[in-house]
């Protein structure tokens, strides 16, 4: 199993998260000081509250995605370690962020950092936060329609492969991975949905697909590996 990660991409966004958080706090503090020294200037504290709030949330978003040790891409890489050398994970190198090359083709993983409970009931997705985490609704990104998002990323990957290698015909599928949420799936989601610890088992059992010819796999590896000259490789 090889893991190719665009570390420069991750570091840049991690820096954005850190500086946005610090700037947001500085703006909030500045507005508070102005309100104490000159209460008549109400527009400055209110303006700093709005701007500081936005910057702080930008910082939290990037921190959750690119800074924390348990960020989604790191958890996925950890979960996939132990697969054989027919597998390779490409992180932030392709038109979609997480791509696994495997014997049966390509799997696009869509990673979701949501907390609380994620439910799929009666064909609808919901993110339910417990009382202890209600404050997180302000900083946590919306859940949206994860299945539709996955379908769009699969399409983007298919189009990229078609453009780069029109002679190559390999299956491309998608899967959802929630690295923090408690999953409650009363119905079968339209796309495989799981926690990181379930990914390897899914690939080996329910999600296992027939192996492609060696020639096809070699060509697929060649096309994908063209994106990694500056990436860091991990065993």
Image (cartoon, rainbow, N blue to C red):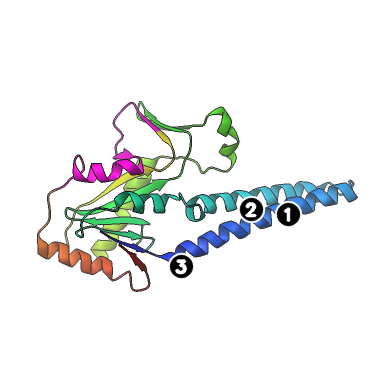
Q: Is residue 56 above or below residue 2?
A: above
What is the C-alpha distance between the residues marked 1 and 3?
28 Å
Q: In the figure, is residue 37 to the left or right of 25?
A: right
Give the crowd class for mark 3: few <14, some 14-19, many >=20 residues within 10 Å: few
Q: Is residue 5 above or below residue 207?
A: below
Q: Is label 3 or label 2 in front?
A: 3
Element carrying mark 3: helix
Residue 122, horizontal then vertical, whole percent: 35, 26
Residue 39, horizontal then vertical, whole percent: 89, 46
Residue under numbered circle 2 = 55
Residue 2, horizontal then vertical, whole percent: 28, 61
> Of residues 148 and 135, which is closer to you in this image?
135
Q: Identify the magenta region.
A: 183-209
Q: Earlier in the sequence, mark 1 or mark 3?
A: 3
> Of residues 128 and 122, which is closer to you in this image?
128
Q: Which mark is residue 43?
A: none
Q: Residue 147 lies in magenta, yes or no?
A: no
Residue under numbered circle 3 = 8
Q: Which mark is residue 27?
A: 1
> Of residues 153 and 200, which is closer to you in this image?
200
Q: Earlier in the sequence, mark 1 or mark 2?
A: 1
Q: How many marks?
A: 3
């Amino acid at each position: 199993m090889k893991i190719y990660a665009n570390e420069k991409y991750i570091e840049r966004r991690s820096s954005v998260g850190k500086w946005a958080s610090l700037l947001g706090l500085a703006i909030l503090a500045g507005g508070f000081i102005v309100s104490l020294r000159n209460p008549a200037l109400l527009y400055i504290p209110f303006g700093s509250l709005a701007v500081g709030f936005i910057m702080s949330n930008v910082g939290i978003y990037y921190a959750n995605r690119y800074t924390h040790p348990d960020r989604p891409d790191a958890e996925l890489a950890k979960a996939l370690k132990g697969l054989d050398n027919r597998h390779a994970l490409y992180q932030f190198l392709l038109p979609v962020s997480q791509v696994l090359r495997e014997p049966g083709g390509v799997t696009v993983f869509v990673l979701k950092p949501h907390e609380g409970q994620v439910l799929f009931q009666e064909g609808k997705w919901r993110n339910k936060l417990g009382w202890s985490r209600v404050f997180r609704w302000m900083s946590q990104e919306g859940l949206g329609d994860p299945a539709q998002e996955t379908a769009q990323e699969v399409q983007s990957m298919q189009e990229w492969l078609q453009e780069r290698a029109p002679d190559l015909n390999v299956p491309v599928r998608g899967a959802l991975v929630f690295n923090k949420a408690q999953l409650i799936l009363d119905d079968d989601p339209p796309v495989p949905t799981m926690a990181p610890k379930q990914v390897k088992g899914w690939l080996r059992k329910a999600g296992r697909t027939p192996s492609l010819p060696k020639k096809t796999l070699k060509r697929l590896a060649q096309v994908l590996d063209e994106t990694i000259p500056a990436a860091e490789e991990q065993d």
